[in-house]
Amino acid sequence: MSAPFFLVAMPTMEDEQFGRGVVLVNQHDNTGAFGLLLNQALVDEDLQPTQMTAEIKDLAGNTVFHITEDLLDGGPVNDEAIFALHDCDDVGTEQSRVGDGLYLETEPEIFQKLLESDERRAHRRFFLGCSQWGAGQLESEIRAGSWLLVPYDRKFLFEMRAGDETSAEDIWKQVMRSGGVDPLTLMGQGSSDAGPN
């Protein structure tokens, strides 16, 4: 399956970081794979959503915008780096495009453009850290039954987000169902069952 696509953790997943996780794989080739964990809100010690703060200043150094944005935990690699996914064609470039109408950004000036308008809020997601696999590593995990591959669907990225009204578990179940697997049939596998519905 060519990127972008979803990886959905099976209940037998042994890595706690990815338990009940949904990863959007943005790049996958013979050198390895890169993606972002979609359904884990980043929270602080008090279990409150952790936010990115962006200040946009004018030429005189005065703050024009002061914006906070909830961050998602993108994975255990590069855990101090911020990544943005969006579908804003007027901001994205050919270099940042990872699929039709989907862009991955790492540059602060692009973050500012994305944050300048509340109209773009529904079209962007910010992540701290990412998920990466070396050559052949992801294929090995898939053969071992750790992951279910599911075609990319925009609604699971932009219309649903853990930490809003939808829980990480809800997203996991819905993406799994979209891949043709009912989580209820997996009850009893792994360390805990799939829960109700």
Image (cartoon, rainbow, N blue to C red):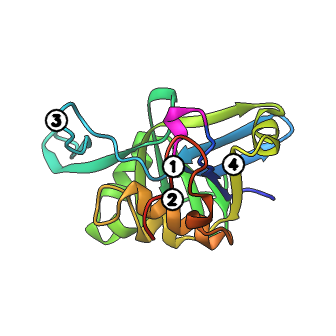
Q: Mark 1 touching mark 4, by CB under 8 A?
A: no
Which mark is on residue 10?
none
Amino acid type, residue under disc 4 in the picture: Trp
Asked whether residue 27 is drawn in magenta, I would say no
User: Marks 2/1: CA distance?
Assistant: 6 Å
Q: Using a 10 Å C-alpha cutoff, classify the residue at mark 1 as few (fewer than 14 neighbours), some (14 to 19) or many (20 or more).
A: many
| Viewport quadrant of the N terminus | bottom right
Q: Mark 2 touching mark 1, by CB under 8 A?
A: yes
Amino acid type, residue under disc 3 in the picture: Asp
Region rendered in magenta: 14-20
State which tag comes first along the sequence, 2 or 4: 4
Q: Which residue is mark 4?
A: 147
User: Marks 1/4: CA distance?
Assistant: 10 Å
Furthest-front residue in view?
188
Q: Mark 3 touching mark 1, by CB under 8 A?
A: no
Q: Is residue 91 visible?
A: no
User: Marks 3/2: CA distance?
Assistant: 24 Å
User: Marks 4/3: CA distance?
Assistant: 31 Å
State which tag comes first along the sequence, 2 or 1: 1
Find residue 174 and report its horizontal and vertical position in percent: 52, 69
Q: Which residue is mark 3?
A: 46
Q: Using a 10 Å C-alpha cutoff, classify the residue at mark 4 as few (fewer than 14 neighbours), some (14 to 19) or many (20 or more).
A: many
What kind of element bears circle 1? loop
* Residue drawn at x 43%, y 57% as measured from the top left: 169
Does residue 72 appear to the left or right of 142 in the view shown? left
Amino acid type, residue under disc 2 in the picture: Trp
Asked whether residue 18 is drawn in magenta, I would say yes
Q: Which residue is mark 2?
A: 172
* Residue drawn at x 62%, y 72% as measured from the top left: 178
Location of residue 118 by image quarter: bottom left
Which mark is on residue 20?
1
State which tag comes first along the sequence, 3 or 1: 1
